[in-house]
Amino acid sequence: MLLLIILKTLKDLHFINKAKNRNIPKVDVCFNDLDELKIEKLKKNIIEKKLHYAEFGKLNYRSKDYKSIVPVLANYISKLKNEKAFVFIDPYGYKEIRASEIKDILSSKKAEVLLFLPTQFMYRFDEKGTPKALIDILEELVDLKDWKVNNSVYGFIEQFNNALRQYLGKDFFVDTFTIQKDESTVYCLFFFSSHIRGFEKMLETKWEIDQEHGKGWSYEKTIDLFSFIKINSLEEKVVKYISENDKVTNGDIYEFILRLGFLPKHINEVFAALQNDKKLNVFSTKGENIRKGAFYISYENYKKAFDKIYFKII
């Protein structure tokens, strides 16, 4: 179903651009599934629903093992010139997934990756005693003696996400989007990017869907499933970050808050409140006071004026 939605979206975008006389880039798509019957069923559905035409780009199908296709894919992406790639990985379970393979795909900085994981099942196994399949994933990311058993699936997701961030390093960005169908079913999408602007656009989409916490979607909204994460935590983390570092600039703050999963509008609200409470000073690089409410936290300033101003906690 999701693959059909992807093609439907690409089709809609093609005709929207065509109607507005915009440049229409071709998008080549390749679907891979080890099960050949599923590939044949997918082909049939695409034809019946008229979801793809040659003018959209190339459409290819493969029935290869995931482990064999990843190195080929990483090599293919590295040789792209002006094109960019988007890779969606939806595995059967999770035992074949390795962070090192995702890093290989990202290494050329020409791709973004969306990984779907059955985190509810991973958490259940972790809670009852970590099985070998999960150990194989974790030991690549962390020293197993430092891994803590969690009391909720969301705690597991947060710890796993932090481990991915540490493993990938500062050249890459990663965040999550949770999907909860019911109280016992929680899945998670992990989004990986090497471009900070692309990462910000992903976060914007998350916050549009979940305006309270920007963490995920729930089929049932009668219970607040994300109360353990408050936007007020942003203030605590940013105050600590500024206090512990010398001359934290607007560019530093932009990257710092995005890596926490927040947007510029959130930190602007936090900084405005801190200024009103006379807990924050803002200076130019020459040490001059900056007018109240001017924080310069955006992608444009990150690119062109990374160190336009700096912040001090009073």
Image (spheres, grey):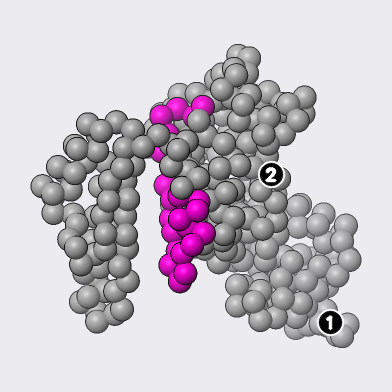
Residue at 56 percent of width and 29 percent of height: 153
Residue type at tag 2: Tyr
Of the numbered discs in the image, which one, if any, rests on residue 214? none
Q: Would you name the residue on which mark 1 appears? A: 285
Residue 226 falls inside the magenta stretch? no
Residue at 29 percent of width and 80 percent of height: 22
Relative horizontal placement of residue 184, taking residue 193 as reference (left or right): left
Depicted 144 relative to depicted 167: above or below? above
Quarter holding the N terminus is top left
Quadrant of the image occupied by residue 258: bottom right
The reply to whether residue 159 is visible in this rendering is no
Q: Front-most of 228 and 84?
A: 84
Residue range highlighted in magenta: 73-95
Of the numbered discs in the image, which one, if any, rests on residue 167? 2
* Category of crowding for the residue at label 1, using alpha-carbon neighbours closer than 10 angstroms: few (below 14), some (14–19), many (at least 20): few
Depicted 96 relative to depicted 72: above or below? above
Quadrant of the image occupied by residue 294: bottom right
Residue at 60 percent of width and 30 percent of height: 137
Query: The residue tagged with tag 1: helix, strand or loop?
Result: loop
